[in-house]
Image: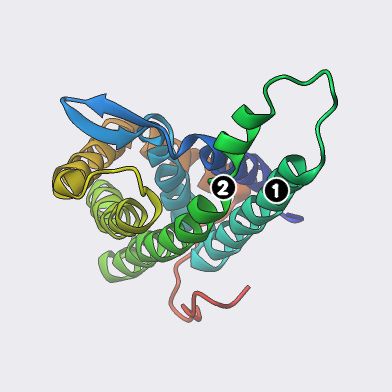
Amino acid sequence: MSGYRFLNFIMLADVTIGLVCIPTAGKLVDVLGTPLSVTIFYFPFVYVFSAVTTEVYGYAIARRLLWYTIAAQVVATIAFQLAIAVPPSAVLRNQQSYVDVLSTAPRLVLFGNVAIFLGDTVNNLIVAKMKVWSGGNYLPLRFVTSMFCGQLVDTSIFYIFALGTLPASALASSISLEVSISVLVAAVCLPVSRAVSAWLKRAENLDVFDYTTNFNPLRF
């Protein structure tokens, strides 16, 4: 994005994690005896990046980054379906492995995009609104609160609708543990998040307060 020195790096990190999540989100791993998507090891950082982006650049820019990530995931999913549909070479012996992994992408992306759209919007809205209300103070409280609320929305939608292999009996415990771990990640990252936010504000000569921002999440 022109006019900003470091925003493209944040966008690159955000889109990269979003793309990595497509073929991997369906894999469940046991954490403390509870089944979680393997994305628990990296997806929470999307919300950390989003909070920092909103804090420095404002809600409108963070919303635009969210749309870029969604667009990249849709394009990747189309490419995955093409890879499945094209007849394999006679020398390829593991076509079914591609089908098994990549065929889940449309469902994961559909519900995953609904989840991240609503969750990330909640996350960004809370950061922006609390920043205005607090006059830019209480950044740790704003970041942790936004992570909790955003991840609760995101995780609930994704686990209920996207992860068809997750037993219904494990839903509540899986959602609770994922949200708890995500909040812990936000808390552990606070010193870095705070330092990066302050550094970006100085480097970009920017510190946006969303006093008059249109918070319609459907705007690009």
In the picture, measured across the screen, residue 69 lies left or right of residue 41, that is: right
Q: Nearest the camera: 142 or 132?
A: 142
**Mark 2: few/some/many CA within 10 Å (<14, 14-19, 20+):** many
Badge 1 marks a residue whose secondary structure is: helix
Q: Nearest the camera: 201 or 149?
A: 149
Q: How far apart in space, not on screen, are marks 1 and 2 (Cα)?
A: 8 Å
Q: Quadrant of residue 65?
A: bottom right
Q: Position of residue 126 (x, y in %)?
A: 32, 64
Q: Quadrant of the C terminus?
A: bottom right
Q: Position of residue 93 (x, y in %)?
A: 72, 19
* Residue at image mark 1: 81
Q: Position of residue 6 (x, y in %)?
A: 65, 42
Whether residue 171 is situated above or below residue 185 in the rendered picture: below
* Amino acid on which disc 2 is placed: Ala
* Amino acid on which disc 1 is placed: Gln
Which residue occupies 26% across, 46% down?
A: 140
* Residue at image mark 2: 105
**Mark 1: few/some/many CA within 10 Å (<14, 14-19, 20+):** some
Q: Nearest the camera: 48 or 113?
A: 113
For marks 1 and 2, the one nearer the N-term is: 1
In the picture, measured across the screen, residue 208 lies left or right of residue 132, that is: right
Q: Position of residue 84 (x, y in %)?
A: 71, 41
Q: Quadrant of the N terminus?
A: bottom right
Which residue occupies 66% across, 50% down?
A: 77
Assess whether mark 2 and mark 1 are in contact (beta carbons under 8 angstroms): yes
